[in-house]
Image (cartoon, rainbow, N blue to C red):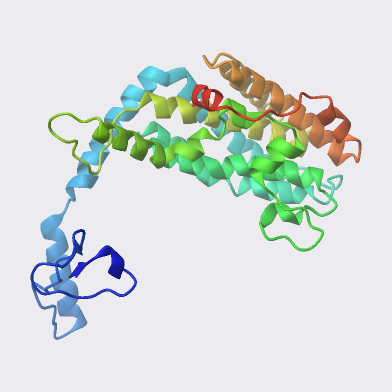
Amino acid sequence: MCVAPAMFEEPHEHVGEPTGTAAVCYAAYVPLVGLDFASEEEAQAALDAWLTRHDPPKVQTDLAGFEAAHLAGFLAEYGRSIRHLYIGFDQLVALVDEVNFIDKRDWPQHRALQFILIAKNLKPFHSAIDRLTKGSYQDAMTLTRGPYETFLRVVHVSIYSENPWGALSVQSGKGVPTFNATGLARDVLGLDWRKYGIMSPFTHSNLFEVLQALKRQEQQQGEAEQFGLNYEDDPTLVEAVLPLLQFLVLAYLRFVREVLIGSAEVRDPSQLPEVDQAIEWAAFLLRANPKPYWMQVVADLDYILEVLGLADHGEDWKAVRDRREPVTERTDTEGQRGT
């Protein structure tokens, strides 16, 4: 089948060469074998034979080897940060589990919603860490967005605690404040996170690689680049998503420890000092990041939790917000520095 651009809405089949100057041609599908079986058992046996002939798939074998080698090199390069990420997340999972057993009679009505939001995002959170350490950086970026937005949803619930259900839907009912991650961070909380490029990993992800490949192709001299499934180290992508995951471990730990548990009695009190140390080390590692804006983001987390506490008690959190410098528009240069 050959389709000229002007014919996309009404495709035409052509025999021989297409007319026009920029037609797109597709080879017609011709069945190579007939799959006709006398019984379900015969079909299953034939399928099993075909699958066995092609096992194990080369991609899976090669990928397993790459992931094992990558993890070893990754731990050598980023060992302390990754080990803290693993241990901090481990502390977070144990702490969330502990929340199930504390006395919740003094919780405000919206607190249960926040707890469930946190608990139900632990799996994608762990998946993001796993994909990062195994070399699938773009997947890690994509998966990180859920836990990031969940933390902001948790804040939204406290700020709009009288009607928090907009945190669960982009199509809230009349009078229900609608959740928007960028709007909440920038307009409601006055956070200049877009200036720092905090959202850059989500924006770039695979699109970033596509644009870089197109740029290389445009500048190519000699043999053209070959495209296909490719796994390779990319420090730029690692250094975009790793600190974001570190920040989320810190934010989740602090919220669960300080807000959900607080002064409540827990089954194993010795667990809490370990969590407190995990929090301190997470903040320390972020402040030590070569990009100085992460130090400001750690300070921003103090501010967010202050706002959350004031909102929970019905106090004037906006007065604290209004003392901050107003958010400025991000320039192209600032966006590049933040990536």
Identity of the residue drawn at 56% across and 13% down = 288
Counting the numbered discs, the total is 0
Looking at the rendered image, the quarter that the N terminus falls into is bottom left
Q: Where's residue 76, x and y in %?
A: 36, 18
Q: Quadrant of residue 260?
A: top right
Q: Where's residue 185, x and y in %?
A: 69, 37
The answer to whether residue 239 of the structure is visible from this angle is yes
Identity of the residue drawn at 40% across and 25% down = 236
Q: Where's residue 4, x and y in %?
A: 24, 65
The answer to whether residue 264 of the structure is visible from this angle is no
Image side of residue 10 versus residue 103, left or right: left
Identity of the residue drawn at 24% across and 46% down = 60
Q: Residue furthest right?
A: 315
Identity of the residue drawn at 60% across and 16% down = 287
Q: Residue furthest front?
A: 20
291 or 17, nearer to the observer? 17
Image side of residue 186 versus residue 200, left or right: right
Q: Residue furthest bottom?
A: 38
Image side of residue 150 versus residue 4, left or right: right
Q: Where's residue 262, x and y in %?
A: 78, 33
64 or 232, nearer to the observer? 232
Q: Quadrant of residue 135?
A: top left
86 or 248, nearer to the observer? 248
